[in-house]
């Protein structure tokens, strides 16, 4: 990606990663990503805001060479290497440059990148720093995504450089978000990266609410020229409000759990309840995580393998527990051959979630008529609870 002007003295100099398919060897990136980096050129000094993933350092270097600038400061909003990883090479090329960051981020960068103490300037929450005719203000926003995260506000131009906050894993030639196309990538990003930190996100949104912002420039995905859209989405996702939607991650080995899942899905549809099954053997995990962002109810459907849940279900339960979605209700259904401790094991795995559980439906072998009646009862109970939720909203 070539460098692009955002406003006078403000340039985007980062890199698009069109081909990256997975992040942290965990998070699928069906639409690639970008590592955005920005230049703010003041009348006296020039700052580089965040860098790029080490795999794309050369693109950043080419963009900086094209602008022919001397960098005085590197602003590190976050220590994760997709933003900090090119700092050592920038320091090599601009040996007088200093890193401006907060104390937590400094500690991370020192250890991850082996940069000596004397290269850092540490700033406090709310502190301002002059580049001449442009002023940077640093605002601590912990846990979007690590404890070290902060955002940088360019006072005169009303631009918020938000690093991971408000980002999306979307490789796009568009510098600014198209409002029609950002909802899904932003929601996927929120689900995969931000969801565990809901209460901290609410605090950070509150902290930013009085700031006059014309542009939000995150370090992944396109920029937001209408900040209210993405901030509104975050306010909604991070709130306690859930939708009357049921998701059913399921896996089946010999068909019993599949029959149960299909039956329950139809029973819920008959009751006008929004429901979506996800076959764990085929579904890309990001699809499930997006559905978790605002759903109220989850039904885990699995056969028993060696007394516990199928490993695909155990893996999903581990991830769901770690990401702490705002689910309210849960149920476990599935099958076994000669015995099962699946219910107890799955509930233990989901210990972070404060779920109110419906009675489990666990059957031996293929479902019989009385088992279908139990699934009908489960559908009735779910309907009852979702009706209560609806009445409360
Ligand atoms: Fe994009 Fe937490 O790094």
Image: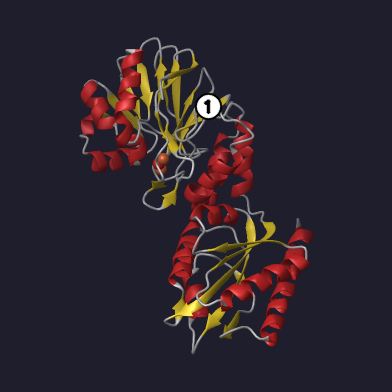
Identify the colour scheme used.
Answer: secondary structure
Query: Which residue ends up furthest to the front in the rendered image?
Result: 254
Q: Report the front residue among 3 and 194.
A: 3
Relative to 164, is 387 on the left or the right? right
The number of discs equals 1
Residue 388 makes an appearance in the image:
no
Instruction: Give the labeled residue for mark 1.
Output: 174
- Number of residues whose C-alpha sits closer than 10 Å to that of mark 1, classed few (under 14), some (14–19) or many (20 or more): few
Q: Estimate the x, y position of residue 392 in percent, counting from the top left.
A: 76, 59
Query: Which residue ends up furthest to the top in the rendered image?
Result: 43
Residue 247 position (above or below residue 70): below
Q: Estimate the x, y position of residue 51 in percent, counting from the top left.
A: 35, 30
Quarter of the rendering containing residue 248 = bottom right
Q: Residue at x 72, y 78 (%)?
A: 377
Q: Estimate the x, y position of residue 220 in percent, counting from the top left.
A: 46, 35
Which image quadrant shows ligand 1?
top left
Q: Residue at x 64, y 35 (%)?
A: 180
Residue 191 position (above or below residue 46): below
**Split into 4 quadrants, where in the image is the N terminus?**
top left
Residue 221 makes an appearance in the image:
yes
Q: Estimate the x, y position of residue 319 in percent, counting from the top left.
A: 46, 61
Relative to 312, is 232 on the left or the right? right
Residue 54 position (above or below residue 128): below
Q: Residue at x 68, y 59 (%)?
A: 245
Relative to 35, is 373 on the left or the right? right
Query: Which residue ends up furthest to the bottom in the rendered image?
Result: 338
Whether label 1 lies within 8 Å of ligand 1 gets the answer no
**Split into 4 quadrants, where in the image is the C terminus?**
bottom right
Residue 213 position (above or below residue 277): above
Element carrying mark 1: loop
């Amino acid at each position: 990606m070539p460098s692009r002007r955002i406003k006078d003295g403000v340039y985007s100099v980062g890199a698009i990663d069109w081909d990256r398919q997975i992040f942290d060897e965990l998070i699928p990136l069906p639409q690639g990503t970008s590592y955005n980096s920005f230049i703010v050129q003041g009348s006296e000094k020039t700052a580089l805001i965040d860098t790029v993933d080490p795999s794309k350092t050369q693109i950043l270097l080419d963009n900086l060479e094209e602008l022919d600038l001397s960098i005085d400061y590197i602003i590190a909003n976050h220590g994760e290497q997709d933003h900090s990883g090119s700092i050592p090479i920038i320091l090599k090329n601009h040996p007088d440059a200093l890193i401006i960051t907060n104390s937590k981020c400094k500690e991370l960068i020192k250890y991850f990148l082996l940069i000596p103490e004397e290269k850092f300037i540490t700033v406090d929450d709310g502190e301002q720093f002059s580049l001449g005719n442009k002023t940077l203000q640093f605002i601590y926003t912990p846990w979007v995504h690590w404890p070290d995260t902060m955002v940088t506000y360019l006072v005169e131009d009303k631009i918020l450089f938000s690093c991971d906050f408000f980002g999306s894993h979307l490789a796009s030639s568009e510098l600014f978000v198209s409002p029609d196309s950002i909802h899904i990538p932003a929601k996927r990003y929120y689900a995969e990266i931000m969801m565990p930190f809901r209460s901290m996100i609410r605090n950070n949104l509150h902290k930013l609410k009085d700031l006059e912002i014309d542009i939000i420039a995150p370090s992944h995905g396109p920029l937001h020229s209408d900040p209210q859209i993405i901030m509104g989405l975050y306010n909604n996702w991070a709130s306690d409000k859930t939708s009357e939607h049921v998701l059913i991650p399921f896996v089946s080995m010999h068909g019993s759990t599949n029959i149960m899942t299909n039956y329950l899905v139809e029973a819920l549809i008959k009751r006008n309840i929004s429901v979506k099954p996800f076959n764990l053997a085929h579904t890309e995990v990001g699809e499930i995580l997006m559905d978790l962002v605002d759903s109220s109810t989850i039904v885990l459907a699995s056969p028993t393998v060696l007394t516990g849940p199928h490993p695909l279900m155990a893996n999903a339960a581990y991830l769901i527990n770690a990401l702490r979605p705002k689910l309210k209700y849960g149920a476990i259904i599935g099958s076994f051959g000669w015995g099962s401790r699946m219910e107890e094991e799955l509930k233990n795995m989901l210990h972070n979630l404060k779920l109110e559980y419906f009675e489990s439906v666990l059957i031996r072998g293929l479902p019989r008529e009385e088992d279908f009646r139990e699934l009908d009862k489960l559908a009735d109970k779910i309907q009852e609870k979702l009706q209560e939720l609806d009445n409360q909203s």
